[in-house]
Every structure is written in structure tokens, then in C-alpha cells.
Amino acid sequence: MPRLLTYLVISEVSMKERKHYTEKIACNPATSHISQWHYVEWHKAERYVKGMQIRIAKATQEGKWR
């Protein structure tokens, strides 16, 4: 399957899943999860994300697209 066609098929499936997920969230709000944001170790999360961004940038520069 050509790359563009593969992307379009995946994109279409993703849109359907996203719509289904959004509808599910709209029907079942999880208010108890709001308070859990206070327990996230933000320093660790930010450090992890920064590391991932560096790995992605390095792989992109090296042409590693897997």
C-alpha cells in the first residue's frame, strides 16, 4: 500500500476512534480524576518529556523514522 494511502486509512480510523472516545468521555465525565493532577510529580514528568524531545530530534536528524 502506498505511504500516502496508508496514512489516509490510518487517519480515517483514528478519526472514528477519536469520535467514539470523545462521545464516551462526554457521556461519562470522570470528576474524581481532576484531583489526581495534584499528585503528578511534574518535575519528573517535564524531565521525561524533555528527554523524549531530545531523542526525537536526534533520530529525526539522523533520518531514523521507524
Image (cartoon, helix red, strand yellow):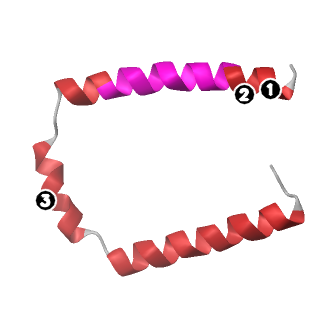
Q: Point out residue 60 in the picture as x, y percentages from the top left corner.
A: 79, 61
Residue of label 1: 4
Q: Point out residue 35 in the picture as x, y percentages from the top left corner.
A: 13, 59
Q: Is residue 6 left or right of residue 44?
A: right
Residue 15 drawn in magenta:
yes
Q: Which circle's residue, 1 or 3, is located before the other in the chain?
A: 1
Q: Out of 66 and 53, give the one closest to the viewer.
A: 53
Say few, some or many: other residues with alpha carbon within 10 Å of mark 2 (under 14 / 14 to 19 / 20 or more).
few
Q: Secondary structure at mark 2?
A: helix
Q: Calculate the distance from the C-alpha at mark 1 to the C-alpha at mark 3.
A: 42 Å
Q: Point out residue 17 in the picture as x, y percentages from the top left corner.
A: 46, 23
Q: What amino acid is found at the position of numbered circle 3 in the picture?
A: Ser
Q: Is residue 35 above or below residue 18?
A: below
Q: Out of 6 and 41, give the one closest to the viewer.
A: 6
Q: Calculate the distance from the C-alpha at mark 2 to the C-alpha at mark 3.
A: 37 Å
Q: Is residue 17 left or right of residue 66?
A: left
Say few, some or many: other residues with alpha carbon within 10 Å of mark 3 (under 14 / 14 to 19 / 20 or more).
few
Residue 64 drawn in magenta:
no
Q: Point out residue 59 in the picture as x, y percentages from the top left corner.
A: 79, 64
Magenta range: 9-22
Are circles 1 and 3 on residues that touch, CB within 8 Å?
no
Residue of label 2: 7
* Residue 35 numbered tag: 3
Q: Is residue 16 above or below residue 21?
A: above
* Residue 53 numbered tag: none
Q: Calculate the distance from the C-alpha at mark 1 to the C-alpha at mark 2.
A: 5 Å
Name the image quarter holding residue 38.
bottom left
Q: What amino acid is found at the position of numbered circle 1 in the picture?
A: Leu
Q: Which circle's residue, 2 or 3, is located before the other in the chain?
A: 2
Are circles 2 and 3 on residues that touch, CB within 8 Å?
no
